[in-house]
Every structure is written in C-alpha cells, then in structure tokens.
Amino acid sequence: RERESRRWRRSRNPTYEVLAEALERHVSSEVAEMRRAIFSLGQADELLSLLGGAGFRETRRSTVHKWVSFPSQEEFLRRQLASQSPWVIAELDQDRRAALMDETISNLKEFVDDHGLRFPMEAHGVVASK
C-alpha cells in the first residue's frame, strides 16, 4: 500500500515527493511523513469511499490539474521548509542541512525551465451532503 501511495504521489505531485524523500534521508521519517500527509487523500476513489463511510450520500468531485511555478528550486525549498516544522530544520547541523538542500535542488532539476521551477499538481475538490 505504501509503495502504491508513493508511486501515486510521485506521478501527481512529484516535487513534494522529491522533498519528502530528502527529508526522510537527512532529517527523519516523521518529518517526511508530515510532508507526505498533505497528499494523503489524493486518490479520488479513496476520498469518496471515506465520505461514503461517514454517511455522505450525495457527492460531487472535481479534479484540478495545475502547473505551479517558483522562481527557483532554492525558493521552492526555502518556502516549503519555512512552512513545515521550521524549528526542526533550524536544529539541523550545517552538514545535514547542506546535504538536504543539495539533494533536493539536484533532484528538482528536471522541473526547471527558462522561467524557474515549474511542475504539475493535482487536487480533488468535493462537495458532499448527507
């Protein structure tokens, strides 16, 4: 199940999985899972099943595909790390912090074009009633 979930996250929201993998290696698996949790309900049928199990009968779902842009890999990483457990990142020693930055920036290169970092994202919106 976890392997399938990681494969899904990488295909639908790839840069966040790149970041989570680096966080797992250089910080901790707990911090990486906090980043992955953002996409924990990313599979539409799973989301609808949970809503059905909670008693919602009328559901409407829409899936949105967007391209997200940042001026650079460094700016993406700065914003992401500032928004997630900044105290944990601040406590990293200089070598671990540099390794996290270097690995993430390197693995994001495939998403860089002439305008900066650009990548696809997918999200589901649901309206439900009981």
Image: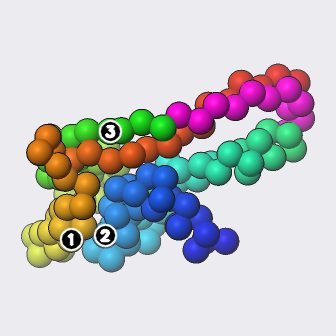
Q: Main secondary structure of the magenta part?
A: strand
Label 3: state its secondary structure: strand
Residue drawn 85% across and 31% down? Answer: 56
Q: Which of marks 3 and 2 is nearer the N terminus?
A: 2
**Mark identifier at residue 103:** 1
From the viewer's perspective, is the residue at label 3 or at label 2 nearer? 3
Residue drawn 44% across and 52% down? Answer: 13
Q: Where is residue 49 in the image (x, y as percent from the top left)?
A: 81, 46
Q: In which quarter of the image is residue 61?
A: top right
Amino acid type for the residue under numbered disc 1: Glu
Is 55 covered by the magenta stretch? yes
Amino acid type for the residue under numbered disc 3: Val
Residues drawn in magenta: 54-64
Is 65 covered by the magenta stretch? no
C-alpha distance separating marks 1 and 3:
21 Å
Number of other residues with Cα within 10 Å of mark 2, as a class: few under 14, some 14 to 19, many 20 or more: many
Q: Where is mark 3, residue-wise?
A: 68
